[in-house]
Amino acid sequence: MDKYKVLIGLEMHCEISETNTKVFSSAKNGTKTANVDLSNIHIRPVDMAFPGTLPVVNKEAVKMSLMASMILNCKQPEYLYFERKNYYYPDLPKGFQITQETKPAPIGIYGHLTFDCHGEEKTVRINNLHLEEDAASSDHYTNCSRINYNRAGVPLLELVTEPDIHSADEAVAFLETMRSIYQYAGISEADSKKGQIRCDVNVSLMEKDKDESDPNNWGTKIEIKNVNSFGGVRDAINYEIQRQLDLIEDGKYEEMEQQTRRWDEESGTTIFMRSKVDAIDYKYFVEPNIPKIKISKEWLEEIRSQIPRLASERKETYINEYGLTDYDATIIVKEKPVAEYYEKMVELGANPKEASNWLTTNLLGHLNKLEQSITEISMTPEMLVELISLIDKKEISSKQAKEVFYDSLTTGKTPKQIVKEKGMTQISDEGAITKIANEVLDEHPDLIEKYKNGRTNVVDFLVGQIMKKTRGTANPGMARSTMLSEIEKR
């Protein structure tokens, strides 16, 4: 790679999950429950292209699209047009897709996104953002294929970048930032597990010392279609880079034609699908059944005023006001539900740093291990704040707190319930601990002499005996100080 640089462009498709209905019909937008709903129940005649049916534009989907366009620093159009992209595929009932092309201008053009990648600031230019309808989903079996039209007509945002990305890590950091934007803006859950995000990746190599701004210097572009996870994007890019480098070493790179490939997760390779030497002619033309829509400046300003606090703003608050490290703040804002969980803890009175420590170290560690999301657990922010309060009030020790934490996660019981049921309330009564300390010293008189002869490490054993007698409920700090005090009296 010393002689070459990588140029990567992304086409990110994200379903708008936060509308009640589809983009051109009154059928339910069932993307949030796509994995549990029955097939072919969220459909209307217009989704199936029945004769005489006409599309009606979902205003809320347009509003969310315009908001995304603004966040990405794009230029919004004066009039909104929709177009027909003509091609036949079994999961496209009409034989065409209602979408947007660059002329007339789509929902947003010529923007940019600045994001962080391993502590370094990167900026990627946005070519365009457009709103379209999703196709149905297909499941292929050995002797048949099944089509589920629930997804047909779901509002879909397609984001097209310029080839400004130079590594797989940068590509994933960009996609994670975009997912965060969609989540924080209330546009989409952006959950790849539910099929709400799909990516096409364009990869090419060029000589490092040539001018990147001149397209004539770019290498042959290879498109990788429908990569369904961020991990898959990383692996597909790294594989394709190495594949193209091998072709260069073998002297075969110049022979490689522009093509579309697919990512095969099982083999960890990209596989040839078709040549793209001749571009497909989709015969775009303006959708005749949807009149052009005037986008007023007043509406744009109204939408702009409704943009919520995004991850970057929250991160600044966590660092500057709550005193968190950049690392912890980054972890918390990565997922909107996690940030909301954290902010609820602080709102309930938890110390921001203590709340961060329990959230990032214990709770998220547990969730990552079990591959769960924070919305799937029974432990509420109130319960975790209650646990922290029990520690602060010295009612339980930090060691006991971890036991209570995992019991609460498992059973759904509150920390106070668990502490009461298990009799775990920490002993902080000086008189009670003094009595137990003297019992221990009476049982081990030889250790008193050893301590006074310089063997101070015997205190650890003696304190351990106090903890054993109290089944771990004695205040550890008080147990140690009391033991030292009682030894000195002997």
Image (cartoon, rainbow, N blue to C red):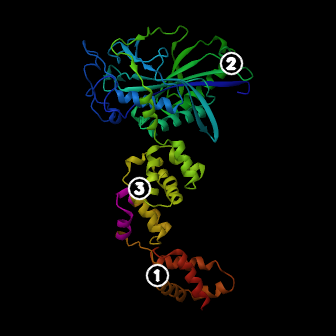
Residue sticking out furthest to the bottom = 490
Number of the front mark, 1 or 3: 3
Identify the mark nearer the N-term, 1 or 2: 2
Q: Quadrant of the N terminus?
A: top right
- Classify 62 as above or below 390: above
Residue sticking out furthest to the front = 298
Which of the 4 image quarters holds residue 488?
Answer: bottom right
Q: Is residue 148 left or right of residue 431?
A: left
Q: Mark 2 — residue?
A: 248
Numbered disc 3: secondary structure:
helix
Residue 14 seen in render: no
Crowd class of label 3 (few under 14; some 14 to 19; many from 20; radius 10 Å): many
Q: Mark 1 — residue?
A: 429
Query: What amino acid type should be assigned to the residue bearing mark 1?
Result: Asp
Crowd class of label 2 (few under 14; some 14 to 19; many from 20; radius 10 Å): some
Numbered disc 1: secondary structure:
loop
Q: Is residue 153 left or right of residue 247?
A: left
Query: What amino acid type should be assigned to the residue bearing mark 2?
Result: Ile
The residues tagged by marks 1 and 2 sit, at their Cα atoms, a distance apart of: 76 Å
